[in-house]
């Protein structure tokens, strides 16, 4: 039985189970953390009634969501009203599939296969699907004969197969693009939820969310591109691997140091994509009641809620992988090939790496909460100006700067030409270029004429901006 | 097979999984494409289009062109379609606007569809597809794609950007000219409420 | 030739267009006055470059420089500027200059002229014009279906915008929306066809497509001598492509938009529409036919059948007849010119239909070369003479004095006040009819020549005769020329013979919604007699007048002076040597093709 499982169930199945439970479980506790962070910011104590330090609060919340009446208002578009939260959560779960957790694991196993000229191919058939066999040595053989039924059996080889598999659910070579693509579907949950509710506040929230998410997807993609350009790869695993070394012996070669501008862009954009303060115009309580999920209650609402937090985790993992070296931490390098530090033969290292990346992720998520309880909300015109007049031009400039530095600086750097890693010298150039770029932007932005003021007061009859008193409406 | 196909692979024969997935994605695309045509509610039409495009992206994944699939998601689903939905929601008079085609129109449309479908079926039955062998050993096909775009196909690539520029300017220009007309209408003496209000403020 | 110099005209135009877009940001009158000057300078510079290139390219044996970028140094580039492309570019730039003159903003605040009103957006308007012309130039040089499609779209998309912003009237907006949706639909069909063409040949490059479609012998030498048979799949692809191009060319089943769109757009934009998209459609069609037929123009079955009829033949006859008959029924001069534009597409299709039969007649009849020459000559001729007609229409102010003339009532009796203008109109109309001593006559002559040659040529042994089909084609061209004479002469007659007093709105039920033929105040024609309001030579009319003069001069020059006609003829002759560019069997090519097929 164990044997069958080993040879047929690929490791990503377990990883998938564990990761989903871990992320969805963490989400519940992130909600507690959010409330705690809010209370710390506001000098309160926060939830402390259910269990020690309020630790069972998430369970109580969950129970409440399940037991509440699942109310659906009249005149909603029933189908869309139901699938909107489902789209939201499905999209987030799909995007979890390509997150890199623990680099690449190398294993060796003895398998028995029919003798072929190419033993690697033969060994691959005996292993679970998706294993990358790098070596296959014949250590013994069984001569041809007949089996119990009397059928002829060819010569069999006993092979020591060495194979590698990524310690994650699946490894796409376009990982980052996949995540951006899939997360861009999350907007449909918001839009359809808002539209199907047949409520003007929900509808306005959906419209705001659409405009916002479309606008912020562009600088998000551009800031990711400036990392992709560095390594010529869209594969998250490769991007992490290339960051796993040190400058001057002790500074970790993370992209936060080479591309700080891109990091801040990315951080801002994932805030906007998560629809959280200061970008939470889509659900601004003071203006729109609750925004797109005004009409939702019970588990349907919980799905929106879950998706928001799970989305935060996903984007934070991507952020860690792009800018904070992913699993990289002293002592967690690979033991197989010094030029390829992500490959390791030890399962425990893989697990520790997952813990490291998860801890870093929680750090980013903490920033999310910190920001939410510290900054006031943007006005809509400010929101749009930030995207179109600041983030997009600056991220384009960053991309241009990256390309130029790589063209001229990369040619000089031996390490970069050989293994596409940023060495200390190149990193210094990058950091300085970033500083120069931001200085340049600050100077130039003074010279650019101000944007036209689009925040007009609407002189709607009866509003306080309307000077003439509203005409008396005659009732008929 | 790797990636998506392997997600469901488990212990099933490696040949059947892609087939099952193919029918799944093709089914999603076809069914929701029918939904696009048959649904009378314009927003539902857009949602059906969403599933059609996602299904096509799934087919691209099956063909191991992950880049194309992701671009399909980013460009069509995440960009174009959302703008369509946006436009539809903003312009439809009531939030539940519906198409009400006349019987004659339905008949004509069905006839045209049947003719086109028959022609396509006949044509595809006679198709002699020229299979292009792709170099699957290449680890990053994206690099080759980029080199093709900025090498052999530089002129079409750049031209596409000029066309997009024209489209963008055109859209902005048309929207602006509408405004200009409004101003002309105002100038002609159609004093609007806001204008009256301006005199007071 | 490097890519930069290969694309020099297009690059100049794109750079000028970008400059114009920046200029459009300014709201000053001076910048609006500058805009057409910039556009004109760009066009003149590129026109001069083009003249130089055509001259330098000169001799008939001189080959083109193959695409600046090409795979493995072969001729598989996406761009390929041969004599054919140089010629098309030359005439499009020349006509582009005239079209810019027509659109010159001459009124006091430079927001348009008598017929055109684009408001404060002169920069954008001329930028769109230049970009559309760039699209046409790129179509001329395209050797790849992607570039071909993008070029056609670049030529078309600006026209959609130009139509709707050319006049601040609902009718123009309506025309723009109609044109846009139908154009997008046609583009979708075209793209569908292109995708099938790619699927069936495995190549986007037109030359690769041509090589893949044609059979090869064992040693990999392409057999250009055999007529290929299209599978139903390929036929469907070709049909869709022809349908897509037909929309741009305004060829009959897809001509229905022409009346409303041409009428709704401002007159200079109408003139633009009647040349640029049409030319891009014809160039693309010629390229497609060349890829299907190979250097010997052995066009396959649905396009031409063994008895000489076929897709092209049917389209030609339908287009000519429907265009002319509908032209006869119109009350609005712009609609008349719109349907005349359809009819002229039909004449050009007739030349292509004759060209397609060249495989069934003896080579001595020379149908192959004369057919293509006829199309190329007629394209230039039509462009030149048509602009004159639109220019005059623009100069003769309408009766309400606000917009250019559109209906017959607007034109009535105008010939008495503006003799020279009316004479110009007469010249253009005679030329469009095909009356001798005009370029239109030479064009018709060239159109009839291949058809007639095919009709009287000897049929090689074992082939069915194309004589009946071609004879009918010639006869129908003749009949159509006669029909068209009726409505062209009606324009001239209205100008000279009708008096204004008889004009009455009630006689114009089909008149455009705008300018509404509202009864004008009594005494209006008295003012008109004195016409202090619209003297002919003013600052406001100069550019348009210049365009009309150039157009009329061209019409007469190319029609009367043999050496001028010969000059154009020679240009056409070398341009028509499109098949001369590809050798019958290129060893390098066929090796590659064999490698590809393995």
Image (tube, coloured by chain):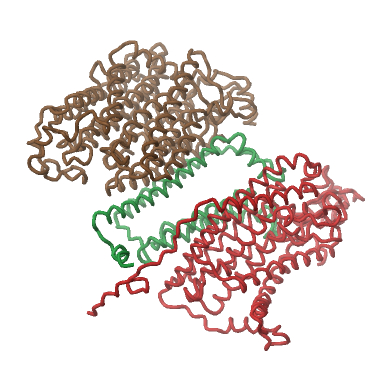
Chain colours: A red, B green, C brown
Q: Position of residue C558 (x, y in %)?
A: 31, 17
Name the outermost residue toward the bottom: A49
Residue beneath the point at 40% across and 11% down: C364
Image quadrant in which the C terminus of chain C is located: top right
Image check: B79 left or right of A224? left
Image check: C341 left or right of C138? left
Q: Is residue C146 above or below residue A399?
A: above
Image quadrant in which the N terminus of chain C is located: top right
Image check: C464 left or right of A241? left
Residue beneath the point at 41% across and 56% down: B37
Residue placed most toward the observer, C79 or C296: C79
Is residue B66 in sight in this rendering?
no
Displayed quadrant of residue B137: top right
Residue placed most toward the observer, B150 or A118: B150
Q: Position of residue B9 (x, y in %)?
A: 69, 58
Image check: B194 left or right of A10? left
Q: Position of residue A369 (x, y in %)?
A: 65, 72
Displayed quadrant of residue A419: top right
Q: Is residue C389 above or below residue B29?
A: above
Q: Is residue C313 above or below residue A79?
A: above
Q: How many tags in the picture?
A: 0
Q: Is residue C157 above or below residue C143?
A: below
Name the outermost residue toward the right: A140
Residue placed most toward the observer, B158 or C166: C166
Is residue A358 in sight in this rendering?
yes
Q: Position of residue C157 (x, y in %)?
A: 41, 41
Residue beneath the point at 40% across and 67% down: A457
């Amino acid at each position: 039985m164990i044997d069958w499982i080993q040879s047929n169930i690929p490791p990503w199945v377990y990883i998938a189970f564990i990761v989903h439970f871990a992320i969805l479980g963490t989400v519940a506790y992130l909600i507690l953390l959010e409330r705690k962070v809010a209370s710390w910011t506001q000098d309160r104590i926060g939830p402390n009634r259910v269990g020690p330090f309020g630790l069972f609060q998430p369970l109580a919340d969950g129970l409440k969501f399940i037991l509440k009446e699942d109310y659906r208002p009249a005149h909603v578009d029933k189908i869309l009203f139901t699938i909107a939260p489902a789209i939201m959560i499905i999209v987030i779960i799909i995007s979890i599939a390509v997150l890199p957790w623990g680099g690449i694991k190398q294993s060796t196993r003895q398998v028995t296969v029919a003798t072929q000229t190419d033993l690697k191919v033969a060994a691959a058939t005996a292993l679970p699907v998706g294993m990358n066999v790098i070596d296959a040595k014949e250590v013994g053989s069984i001569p041809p004969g007949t089996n119990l039924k009397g059928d002829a059996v060819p010569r069999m080889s006993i092979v020591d197969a060495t194979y590698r598999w990524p310690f994650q659910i699946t490894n796409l070579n376009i990982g980052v693009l996949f995540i951006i693509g899939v997360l861009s579907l999350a907007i449909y949950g918001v839009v359809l939820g808002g539209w199907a509710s047949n409520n003007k506040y929900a509808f306005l929230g959906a419209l705001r969310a659409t405009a916002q998410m479309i606008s912020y997807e562009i600088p998000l993609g551009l800031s990711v591109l400036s990392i992709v350009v560095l390594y010529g790869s869209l594969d998250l695993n490769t991007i992490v691997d290339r960051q796993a070394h040190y400058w001057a012996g002790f500074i970790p070669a993370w992209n936060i140091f080479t591309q700080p501008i891109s990091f801040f862009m990315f951080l801002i954009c994932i805030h906007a994509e998560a629809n959280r303060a200061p970008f939470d115009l889509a659900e601004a309580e003071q203006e729109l009641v609750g925004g797109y999920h005004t009409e939702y209650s019970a588990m349907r609402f919980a799905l929106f809620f879950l998706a928001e937090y799970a989305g935060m985790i996903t984007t934070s993992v991507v952020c860690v992988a792009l800018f904070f070296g992913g699993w990289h931490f002293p002592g967690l390098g690979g033991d197989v090939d010094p030029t390829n530090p992500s490959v390791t033969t030890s399962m425990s290292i893989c697990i520790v790496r997952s813990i490291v990346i998860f801890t870093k992720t929680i750090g980013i998520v903490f920033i999310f909460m910190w920001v939410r309880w510290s900054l006031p909300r943007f006005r809509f015109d400010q929101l749009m100006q930030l995207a179109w007049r600041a983030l997009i031009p600056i991220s384009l400039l960053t991309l241009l700067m990256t390309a130029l530095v790589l063209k001229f600086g990369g040619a000089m750097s031996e390490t970069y030409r050989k293994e596409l890693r940023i060495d200390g010298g190149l990193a210094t150039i990058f950091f300085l270029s970033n500083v120069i770029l931001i200085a340049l932007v600050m100077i130039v932005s003074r010279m650019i004429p101000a944007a036209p003021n689009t925040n007009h007061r609407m002189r709607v009859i009866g509003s306080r901006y309307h000077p003439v008193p509203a005409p008396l409406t005659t009732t008929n | 097979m790797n990636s998506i196909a392997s997600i469901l692979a488990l212990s099933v024969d490696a040949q059947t999984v892609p087939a099952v997935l193919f029918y799944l994605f093709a089914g999603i695309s076809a069914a929701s494409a029918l939904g696009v045509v048959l649904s009378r509610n314009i927003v539902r039409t857009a949602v059906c289009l969403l599933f059609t495009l996602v299904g096509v992206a799934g087919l691209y994944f099956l063909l191991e062109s992950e880049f194309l699939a992701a671009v399909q998601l980013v460009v069509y689903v995440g960009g174009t379609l959302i703008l369509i939905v946006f436009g539809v929601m903003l312009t439809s008079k009531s939030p539940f606007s519906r198409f009400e085609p006349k019987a004659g129109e339905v008949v004509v449309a069905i006839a045209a569809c049947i003719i086109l479908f028959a022609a396509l079926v006949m044509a595809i039955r006679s198709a002699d597809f020229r299979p292009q062998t792709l170099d699957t050993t290449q680890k990053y096909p994206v690099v080759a794609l980029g080199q093709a775009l900025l090498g052999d196909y530089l002129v079409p690539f750049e031209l596409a950007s000029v066309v997009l520029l024209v489209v963008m300017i055109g859209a902005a220009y048309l929207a602006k000219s509408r405004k200009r007309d409004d101003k002309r209408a105002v100038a002609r003496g159609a004093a609007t409420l806001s204008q009256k209000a301006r005199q007071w403020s | 030739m490097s890519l930069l110099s290969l694309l020099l005209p297009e690059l100049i135009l794109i750079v000028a267009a970008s400059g114009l877009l920046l200029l459009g940001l300014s709201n000053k009158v001076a910048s609006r006055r500058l805009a057409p000057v910039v556009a004109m300078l760009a066009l003149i510079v590129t026109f001069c470059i083009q003249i130089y290139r055509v001259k330098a390219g000169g001799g008939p044996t001189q080959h083109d420089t193959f695409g600046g970028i090409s795979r493995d140094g072969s001729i598989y580039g996406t761009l390929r500027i041969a004599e054919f492309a140089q010629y098309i570019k030359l005439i499009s730039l020349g006509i582009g200059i005239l079209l810019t003159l027509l659109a010159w903003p001459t009124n006091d605040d430079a927001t348009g002229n008598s017929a055109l009103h684009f408001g404060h957006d002169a920069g954008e308007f001329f930028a769109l014009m230049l970009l559309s012309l760039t699209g046409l130039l790129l179509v001329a040089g395209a050797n790849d279906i992607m570039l071909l499609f993008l070029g056609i779209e670049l030529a078309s998309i600006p026209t959609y915008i130009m139509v709707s912003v050319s006049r601040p009237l609902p009718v123009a907006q309506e025309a723009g929306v109609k044109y846009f949706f139908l154009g997008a639909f046609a583009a979708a069909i075209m793209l569908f066809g292109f995708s099938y063409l790619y699927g069936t040949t495995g190549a986007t490059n037109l030359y690769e497509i041509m090589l893949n479609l044609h059979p090869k012998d064992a040693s990999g030498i392409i057999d250009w001598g055999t007529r290929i048979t299209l599978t139903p799949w390929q036929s469907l692809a070709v049909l869709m492509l022809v349908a897509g191009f037909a929309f741009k060319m305004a060829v009959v089943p897809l001509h229905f938009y022409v009346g409303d769109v041409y009428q709704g757009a401002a007159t200079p934009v109408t003139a633009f529409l009647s040349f640029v998209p049409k030319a891009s459609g014809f160039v693309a069609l010629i390229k497609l036919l060349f890829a299907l037929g190979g250097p010997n123009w052995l066009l396959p079955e649905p396009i031409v059948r063994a008895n000489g009829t076929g897709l092209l033949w049917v389209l030609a006859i339908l287009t000519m007849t429907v265009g002319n008959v509908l032209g006869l029924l119109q009350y609005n001069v712009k609609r008349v010119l719109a349907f005349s534009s359809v009819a002229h597409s039909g004449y050009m299709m007739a030349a292509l239909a004759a060209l397609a039969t060249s495989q069934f007649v003896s080579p001595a009849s020379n149908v192959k070369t004369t057919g293509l020459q006829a199309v190329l000559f007629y394209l230039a001729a039509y462009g030149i003479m048509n602009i004159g007609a639109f220019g005059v229409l623009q100069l003769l102010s309408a009766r309400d004095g606000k917009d250019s003339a559109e209906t017959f009532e607007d034109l009535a009796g105008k010939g008495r006040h503006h003799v020279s203008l009316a004479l110009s109109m007469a010249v253009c109309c005679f030329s469009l009819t095909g009356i001798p001593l005009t370029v239109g006559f030479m064009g018709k002559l060239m159109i009839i020549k291949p058809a007639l040659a095919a009709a009287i040529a000897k049929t090689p042994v074992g082939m069915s005769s194309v004589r009946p089909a071609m004879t009918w084609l010639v006869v129908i061209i003749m009949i159509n020329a006669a029909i068209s004479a009726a409505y062209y002469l009606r324009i001239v007659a209205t100008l000279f013979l009708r008096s204004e007093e008889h004009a009455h709105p009630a006689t114009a039920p089909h008149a455009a919604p705008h300018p509404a033929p509202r009864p004008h105040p009594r005494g209006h024609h008295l003012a008109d007699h004195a016409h202090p309001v619209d003297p002919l030579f003013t600052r406001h009319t100069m550019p348009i007048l210049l365009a009309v003069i150039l157009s009329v001069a061209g019409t007469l020059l190319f029609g009367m002076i043999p050496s001028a006609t010969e000059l154009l003829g020679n240009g056409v002759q070398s341009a028509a040597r499109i098949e001369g560019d590809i050798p019958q069997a290129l060893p390098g090519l066929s090796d590659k093709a064999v490698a590809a097929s393995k």
